Image (cartoon, grey):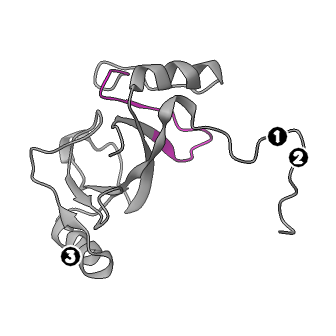
Amino acid sequence: DVDFTPIPTVDPHPPALAGMHWFGIVQYIGGDRTSDWTEFYRELFGFAALPDDERFGILPKGRVLKSPCGHFYLQLIAPIPELLDEEREEKLQRVAFGAPDVLAAVAALRQRGVDFVESPGVHTEARGALTKPHLGGVMFELVHHTPA
């Protein structure tokens, strides 16, 4: 590949840090659009809605969809009027990684300079953690999850 030149001293396939693995994405959607987006992902990719009591991570809002293979999740979050400071546009907002031990993953990432949100409403705990955005970019969420 002409875009990437391997560095001879760097492992091209390093092991996952603290067992982290791809988990899914969080998408903010417009008000009253949950059914539209659920149908879109069902029709196009075969996603199915999880029961309302099945949740992951530290921000268990909205609707969670599961891919047909069962290894990828989409969380659709509609605006919550009492929490909105500004108009929220529809966008992909977070990338989620599963980790069998969230606290160990957070410790390993903090050693590498990753900052996490710590507030009364959102804080690092065994079931999940949320990184601070960097330069207004995407945030990353860690979710307690052990791959099957």
- In the picture, the quarter occupied by the N terminus is bottom right
State the residue position of label 1.
10
Is most of the magenta stretch helix, strand or loop? Answer: loop
Q: Image height check: is 45 above or below 79? A: below
Residue located farthest toward the bottom when viewing the structure as drawn: 43
Asked if the magenta segment contains residue 130, the reply would be yes
Q: Along the horizontal axis of the image, is 11 left or right of 144? A: right
In the rendering, at what x and y percent does residue 60 appear? 22, 40
Q: Which mark is residue 67?
A: none
In the rendering, at what x and y percent does residue 123 appear? 35, 22
Q: Secondary structure at mark 1?
A: loop
What residue span does the magenta drawing correspond to?
A: 124-140
Which numbered disc, 3 or 2, marks the residue closer to the eye? 2
Question: How far, Cα to Cα, is label 3 from label 2?
Answer: 45 Å
Q: Along the horizontal axis of the image, is 95 left or right of 41? A: right
State the residue position of label 3.
39
Question: How far, Cα to Cα, is label 2 from label 1?
Answer: 6 Å
| Crowdedness near tag 3: few (<14), some (14–19) or many (≥20) residues, C-alpha within 10 Å | some
